Image (cartoon, rainbow, N blue to C red):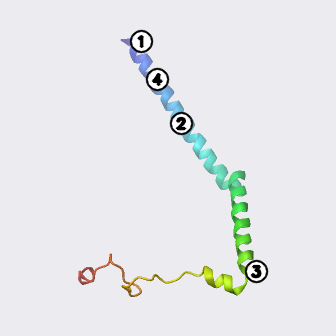
Amino acid sequence: NFDESRKKRAAKQKQQRKTDERKAKEANSEANRVKFGRTGAQKKLDKKRQADAALKHEQHRLAPASETKQTQKKPPTSDKIIPFGLSKAASPKDDDK
């Protein structure tokens, strides 16, 4: 019985040590993130996104006016016109409460 309780205590201590190590590791990585900013992979992704946005902007700027007009959103061609600010979800009954 003494041996069993010792094993249980050792298992608990081992589990606690693992938990403590994991928490310390997470805290350390969070501190580094705050201290050093974004990781290399994140920075690469940011640069790629920035380059894509710049390219899109440049293409739009250089495109003839006729092409840019075609890219603008057209209003829906439905028979029922919903007034601005109103939706099917909001009913007038809710306003009285």
**Residue type, mark 2 in image:** Asp
Q: Earlier in the sequence, mark 4 or mark 3?
A: 4
Residue at which label 3 appears = 62
User: Residue drawn at (62%, 82%), measured in percent from left and top?
Assistant: 70
Give the Cα separation between the discs numbered 2 and 3: 58 Å
Spot occupied by residue 41 in the image (x, y as percentages of width and height): 70, 52
Spot occupied by residue 44 in the image (x, y as percentages of width and height): 72, 56
**Residue type, mark 1 in image:** Asp
Describe the element under mark 2 as helix, strand or loop.
Answer: helix
24 on left or right of 78: right
Residue at which label 4 appears = 11
Q: Where's the N terminus, which quadrant?
A: top left
* Position of 38 relative to 70 (above/below): above
Spot occupied by residue 31 in the image (x, y as percentages of width and height): 63, 50
Residue at which label 1 appears = 3
**Residue type, mark 3 in image:** Leu
Give the Cα separation between the discs numbered 1 and 2: 26 Å
Binning the other alpha carbons within 10 Å of mark 1 as few (below 14), some (14 to 19) or many (20 upward) gives few
Describe the element under mark 3 as helix, strand or loop.
Answer: helix
User: Residue drawn at (67%, 50%), measured in percent from left and top?
Assistant: 32
**In front of the other: label 4 or label 3?**
3
Q: Kindly indicate whether the residue at mark 2 contacts the one at mark 1 (C-beta within 8 angstroms).
A: no
Q: Earlier in the sequence, mark 1 or mark 3?
A: 1
**In front of the other: label 1 or label 3?**
3
Q: Where's the C terminus, which quadrant?
A: bottom left
Q: Earlier in the sequence, mark 2 or mark 3?
A: 2
Give the Cα separation between the discs numbered 4 and 3: 68 Å
Give the Cα separation between the discs numbered 2 and 4: 14 Å
Describe the element under mark 4 as helix, strand or loop.
Answer: helix
Describe the element under mark 1 as helix, strand or loop.
Answer: helix
Residue at which label 2 appears = 20
- In front of the other: 83 or 76: 76
